[in-house]
Amino acid sequence: MIQSMTGFGKAMKQLEDKKISIELKSLNSKNLDLNARMPNQYREKEIILRNLIAKSLVRGKVDFGLYVDVIGSTSSSVINNSVVEDYMNQLRQLGTASEGELLNIAMRLPDTLSTVKEEVEDHEFKLIESLLISALEDLNSHRLDEGKVLEKDFRYRVENIAKLLNEVIAMDPERVEGVKSRIQKNISDLKEKVDENRFEQELIYYIEKLDITEEKVRLKNHLDYFVENLNSTDSNGKKLGFIAQEIGREINTIGSKSNFAPMQQLVVQMKDELEKIKEQLLNVL
């Protein structure tokens, strides 16, 4: 079953002193392109979180956000007493303001506060891992839902190409006869006597050059192989892309060999359906 690379996942847990939220958003990309946002004190665990995401999502342009909202008076900032005292001593020499006013001014100056780096406790990180797994499951559920929509469209397009191919097959004898008649008419218009045996040989050679029997068979096989891979338990957008390229190659060859306007019109319609398949394949995992 195919999966889309588009999806969104979210998980949240409310603790006594903080709320931890995780958000994931994924779009299509040839490889895994992961952008991570998190508070600085959690950066030491970033590699572990990235590996979890990479193992689950495989490909896509992924935005990962870890948000921690502290509740209450808990703060990771402390006052640099020595710096504040030094500022106040200098300010006292400049005027006669009250101690309260001097302190208010000093606290606005640089380096009066410093942030204490907090270690992430094991139990909190286990919770974050659990939330990330939940968010990944949510995102992958979205990917599966999107994949079902894409799969339905692929089957519809492949079926259209197969129907057009059947029309090409039914039309082929008429095309060959038309080519023969056109050549014979051109020869007769020359009003020149020709060697009938040699003419027949040359005609057969020319018709063989325009023969599309192999292309018709290969195109049918590629369409069947595409559907076979849609039925696979794995989602492999790259493999489906390669098959689509082979489908396009056979369609193009039929178009270049056809030399018959009604058949070329069918080829144009097949190309249109294939282009729609290729556009959607960019979103498949």
Image (spheres, helix red, strand yellow):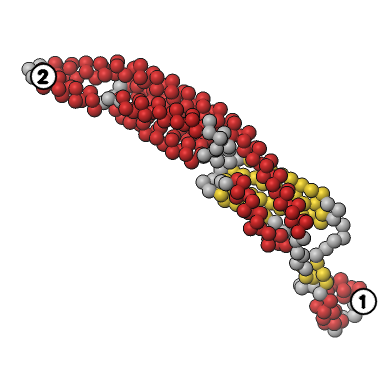
- Identified at 74% across, 56% down, the residue is 125
Front in this rendered view, residue 108 or 184: 184
Q: For residue 11, say whether it is visible.
A: yes
Q: Please identify the quarter of the rendering in which residue 242 is found.
A: top left
Q: Please identify the quarter of the rendering in which residue 244 is found.
A: top left
- Identified at 83% across, 52% down, the residue is 15
- Badge 1, how many Cα within 10 Å: few under 14, some, many 20+? few
- Identified at 56% across, 46% down, the residue is 59
Percent x, y of residue 280? 52, 35
Q: Which residue is mark 2?
A: 197
- Where disc 1 sits, the SS reads loop
Percent x, y of residue 211? 27, 25
Cα–Cα span, label 1 and label 2: 121 Å
Q: For residue 91, say whether it is visible.
A: no
Front in this rendered view, residue 183 or 231: 231
The amino acid pointed to by label 2 is: Asn
Above/below status of 113 relative to 25: below
Left/right of residue 138 with respect to residue 236 in the rendered view: right
Left/right of residue 121 with respect to residue 50 in the rendered view: right
Above/below status of 149 relative to 123: above
Report if the CB atoms under discs 1 and 2 are less than 8 Å apart.
no
Residue 98, numbered circle = 1
The amino acid pointed to by label 1 is: Ser
Quadrant placement of the N terminus? top right
